[in-house]
């Protein structure tokens, strides 16, 4: 499936521009609730998802706008969900943290840290039992590795040899908690390897490096039928959420990482290789910006759930004897 | 008297408890350097040190379970759960260990443990960040459950909870964190027991029993009502102080119970059953519940419809009188 650098660049820019707009809309109170921006980490979702087939499944976290967009879920459906509109990808019921779209095999954001990991193992087990050769890619932050669910899940996947690609997005901070204050073993690939799972790390700021690492990882899951653990070393440029005053990171640290902005790395390379000039880059930006404009317009024009429907789908009442 | 927010009053109460007893230690996610998401533990790590205000990784079950061991050795751990919806990974520890150790050891091992949980909605958040899980804990024998409704009550009850030899689930109404009130910082926290309901506003026609975030709403409703409404803050959800409610109902003959949590098998159901056992013949109408609906907490655009508000409380008061 490997796309070329121009299209990887475009995917990253779509996520970046989408989320920058979300931040503005949040300040303007058009979007409410919780919003966790992925800005700075775009290369991870784009690099990995590019290597999956549409049949492969994805499980993500509350920081999942990028994954949903990279999976190909329409931007206006994602933006409408941010607004809580019925036109949203989860009919307005999930919001920013619970984008969900089974037809795209996008099995959700998840507001509970590590909450998505066990269900990813279950998706893979279902595939295995139905003889479908598919991969389930499960994204989570390094903070999730301290939760019991991480350990239960990776052990089950290894024990039962299930095709799960565990992608740890190590952005070095779980809210205000730095990696070294969270993990006894800060080399996360070493920790995962203890479960007899092939594990390695890669540069999560360079979309090409990310893409190559993902290619190898996905191929190994497919060939071996068992799990692989990939640690993407990355950084979030913004605060943890729109609530977080971000008092725990030094400005210099953020600035140092910003110098490795995945979008700048890719655009510089596009120019250096003569694949694109500034004009072409600007054209992509303009294109992406109008896609975002259209998504916002759709969300603005959307409708809220009728209060009378509040009790719909609490239970299904379904029976299948 | 000092004017302060509930969050500040809790901070002051925690500080007092830590000064009083060396074995009070705080555990939680980002409670030290960051001072907690709601800043309730702000400054405590700086003043008491990293060994008494302990930043833990994301591991709710591990944090509560570790506190069980600490409590067995005579420490008095105070755990902060970041939001209501994140207590569930620790539910096993709470129900299977925290609640049962005293009885299992026939009284040999006490569990002087406090689990602080910001709870309830009204801040434009969503599921996991707006839930009211009190009934799970009230249903579990062996736990005590407290919830303050104003800064003064918060200042005193957090100290009383920490002093309790029994485990206390301490539910903090998060949307009231920023409400201000007068606090007497010199008040003796041990002058009064916290395990009582409080009559906050006397009245003759209808009794409204409520707690936590709904207390302010009910007081406002009582002000606006065209009859005389008595407002009772239950405060101690377990043990439940039904005597104060029954005494009120014997005078008013009408009872409305108000809470944010869903209706089915909630505190309203328990209060209604107990009141009908206590003073059935004083009731002039069935006990009415004004609560959240039996649905998962909705998206922020709908939460104002989900949460009981002044109008719904007044409607409850009218209906119970019109019966
Ligand atoms: C069980 C649980 N505990 C606490 C939280 C609150 N919380 C949300 S995200 C987060 C930090 C998670 O960090 P990490 O897993 O590294 O992912 P990142 O946010 O950095 O992408 C915390 C503490 C939660 N959502 N779920």
Image (tube, coloured by chain):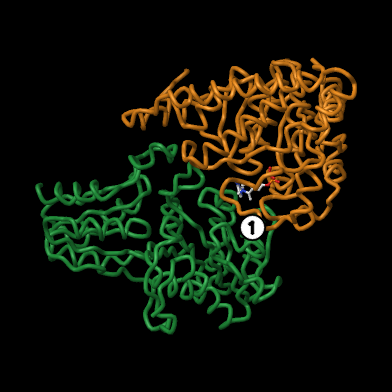
Chain colours: A orange, B green
Q: Chain of mark 1?
A: B
- Is the CB of the residue bearing disc 1 within 8 angstroms of ligand 1? yes
Report the residue marked by disc 1. Answer: B29
Nearest the camera: B271 or A139?
A139
Name the foreground residue: B101 vs A116: A116
Q: As displayed, is residue B99 above or below residue B196? A: above
- Residue A89 image offset from top left, x and y in percent: 53, 24
- Seen from this angle, which residue lies furthest front? A279
- Of residues A80 and B208, the one drawn nearer to the viewer in this rendering: A80
Estimate the x, y position of residue A208 in percent, counting from the top left. 85, 27
Residue A149's place in the image compared with A211, above or below, is below
Q: Quadrant of residue B108?
A: bottom right
Q: Quadrant of the N terminus of chain B?
A: bottom left
Mark 1 packing: few (<14 Cα in 10 Å), some, or many (20+)? many
Residue in the image at 31% along x and 67% along y = B241
| Direction from residue A109 to residue A191 in the image, left or right | right
Q: Position of residue B139 (x, y in %)?
A: 42, 55
Q: Is residue A241 left or right of residue B296?
A: right
Q: Is residue B293 above or below residue B181?
A: above
**Where residue B74 sits: x, y (%)?**
62, 76
Q: What residue is drawn where x is 74% and y is 26%? A: A46
**Residue B288 higher or lower than B242, as above or below:** above
């Amino acid at each position: 499936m490997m796309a070329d650098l121009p299209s990887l660049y475009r995917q990253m820019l779509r996520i970046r521009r989408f989320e920058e707009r979300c931040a503005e809309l949040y300040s303007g109170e058009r979007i409410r609730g919780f919003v966790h921006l992925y800005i700075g980490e775009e290369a991870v979702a784009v690099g990995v998802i590019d290597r999956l087939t549409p049949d492969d499944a994805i499980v993500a976290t509350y920081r999942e706008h990028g994954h949903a967009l990279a999976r190909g879920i329409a931007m206006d459906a994602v933006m409408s969900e941010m607004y809580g509109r019925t036109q949203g990808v989860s009919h307005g019921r999930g919001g920013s943290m619970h984008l969900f779209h089974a037809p795209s095999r996008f099995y959700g954001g998840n507001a509970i840290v590590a909450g998505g990991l066990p269900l990813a193992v279950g998706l893979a087990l279902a595939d295995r039992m139905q003889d479908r050769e598919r991969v389930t890619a499960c994204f989570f932050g390094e903070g999730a590795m301290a939760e019991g669910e991480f350990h239960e899940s990776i052990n089950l996947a290894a024990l039962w040899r299930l095709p799960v690609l565990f992608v740890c997005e190590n952005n070095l901070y779980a809210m205000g908690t730095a990696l070294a204050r969270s993990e006894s073993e800060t080399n996360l690939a070493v920790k995962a390897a203890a479960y007899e799972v092939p594990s390695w790390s890669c540069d999560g700021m360079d979309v090409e490096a990310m893409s190559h690492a993902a290619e190898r990882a996905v191929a190994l899951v497919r060939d071996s039928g068992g799990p692989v653990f990939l640690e993407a070393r990355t950084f979030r440029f913004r605060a943890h959420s729109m609530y977080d005053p971000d008092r725990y990171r030094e400005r210099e640290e953020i600035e140092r990482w910003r110098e490795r902005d995945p979008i700048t790395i890719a655009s510089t390379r596009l120019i250096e290789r003569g694949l694109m000039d500034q004009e072409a880059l600007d054209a992509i930006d303009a294109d992406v910006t109008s896609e975002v404009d259209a998504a916002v317009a759709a969300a603005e024009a959307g409708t809220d759930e009728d209060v009378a429907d509040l009790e719909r789908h609490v239970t299904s009442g379904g029976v299948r004897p | 008297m000092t004017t302060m927010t509930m969050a500040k009053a809790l901070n002051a109460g925690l500080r007092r408890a830590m000064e009083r007893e060396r074995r009070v230690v705080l555990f939680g996610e980002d409670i030290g350097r960051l001072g907690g998401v709601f800043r309730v533990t702000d400054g405590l790590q700086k003043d008491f040190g990293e060994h008494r205000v302990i930043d833990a990784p994301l591991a709710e079950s591990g944090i509560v379970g570790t506190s069980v061991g600490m409590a067995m050795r005579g420490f008095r751990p105070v755990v902060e759960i970041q939001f209501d919806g994140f207590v569930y990974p620790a539910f096993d520890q709470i129900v299977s260990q925290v609640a049962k150790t005293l009885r299992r050891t026939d009284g040999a091992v006490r569990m002087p443990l406090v689990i602080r949980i910001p709870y309830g909605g009204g801040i434009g958040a969503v599921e996991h960040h707006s839930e009211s899980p009190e009934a799970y804990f009230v249903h579990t024998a062996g736990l005590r459950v407290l919830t303050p409704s104003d800064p003064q009550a918060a200042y005193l009850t957090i100290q009383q909870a920490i002093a309790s030899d029994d485990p206390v689930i301490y539910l903090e109404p998060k949307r009231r964190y920023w409400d201000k009130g007068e606090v007497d910082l010199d008040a003796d926290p041990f002058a009064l027991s916290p395990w009582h309901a409080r009559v906050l506003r006397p009245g003759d026609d209808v009794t409204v029993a409520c707690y936590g975030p709904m207390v302010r709403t009910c007081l406002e409703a009582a002000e606006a009502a065209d009859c005389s409404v008595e407002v009772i803050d239950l405060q101690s959800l377990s043990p439940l102080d039904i005597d104060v409610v029954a005494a009120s109902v014997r005078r008013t003959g009408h009872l409305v119970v108000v809470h944010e949590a869903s209706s089915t098998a909630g505190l309203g159901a328990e209060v209604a059953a107990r009141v009908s056992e206590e003073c059935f013949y004083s009731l002039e109408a069935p006990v009415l519940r004004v609560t959240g609906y039996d649905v998962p907490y909705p998206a922020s655009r709908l939460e104002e419809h989900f949460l009981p508000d002044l109008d719904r409380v007044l409607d409850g008061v009218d209906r119970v009188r019109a019966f």
